[in-house]
Amino acid sequence: MKRMLRNTLVAAMLLPAAAMAAERNDMASCYDASKLSEFKPAPSGRQLVIVVDQTIRMPEDIQRSAWEKIDRFVQEGDQVKLYTFSAFVPGEYMRLQADVTLEVQASEAVRNEMGMSKLRQLDTCMKAQKAGFVRGVGGLFVKAMRDANNDNPKSEILHALREVGTDMSQQPARDRVVFLISDMLENSDYASFYANSAIQNLNVAQQIQKASDKALFADLGGARVYVAGAGLVTDSIKQKYRSGKTMDLLNEFWSAYFDKSRATLESFGAPMLNVDLK
């Protein structure tokens, strides 16, 4: 009986968005499942937005390191959103793959007001919730990384960030972190960071002006931004060498871009991000 209850609760944790209330949460509520909705604490107010660029296949060590950082960062009460984007070709577009809010344990005083049977059910569900997050969101993250490919030379990073910012502006959060896993090498009709099959040394002021002229800045709501994978190149790029100057200018552009997008670039992994999300 206990095993059946546990399996039922775990299976319910990642439901289709259509089964959710107006505000999307792909993880079913343990409080609602236990008929203790009136005791549900408020979420933490922290939001982690993960954005995966599927136009570049990341090395396995960067993929693994990225998930480990996500797993260490996420706490009870946090909202986690996973986006993927590619170039605008058939079957490839930006998707919100997951939107999950983990729940907060009730205080001892509140627990004392709950019936014992419902409390046991709640505890069983809450213990399984983080594991459900790892299986559900973690599985989607792994799939997003593995579905990435190097076949499309176009990359619409600026447009994708603007769209993510539009989504973020629809939900309040007291603390936001954006984790962007991308080569950060825009190659679109808006701008190209390549020249003669090599990464060019950017004219940062000129590129920022282009972004401004084309209304490409995002509204990231005061987020701290972390990047992994910057500067990675595919086999189609003849000149694989990237000088320190080239990477410094790339970093400088994105730092200025995020500053104008109501965000702060905290760390620029080129390509490995060597700090934790904070």
Image (cartoon, helix red, strand yellow):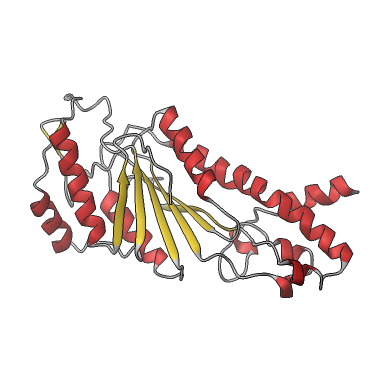
Residue furthest to the front in view is 109
- The residue under the point 37% across, 59% down is 164
Q: Is residue 273 left or right of residue 103?
A: left
Q: Is residue 26 left or right of residue 240?
A: right
Residue 105, position in %: x, y?
Answer: 69, 61
Q: Is residue 234 above or below residue 82?
A: above
> From where the camera sits, is residue 207 visible?
yes
Residue 207, position in %: x, y?
Answer: 13, 52
Residue furthest to the bottom in view is 38
- The residue under the point 91% across, 49% down is 1
> From where the camera sits, is residue 11 visible?
no
Residue furthest to the right in view is 1
Q: Is residue 147 left or right of residue 263?
A: right
In terms of image quadrants, where is residue 223? Answer: bottom left
Residue 100, position in %: x, y?
Answer: 57, 57
- The residue under the point 61% across, 49% down is 133
Q: Is residue 274 above or below residue 85?
A: above
Q: Is residue 253 above or below residue 60?
A: below
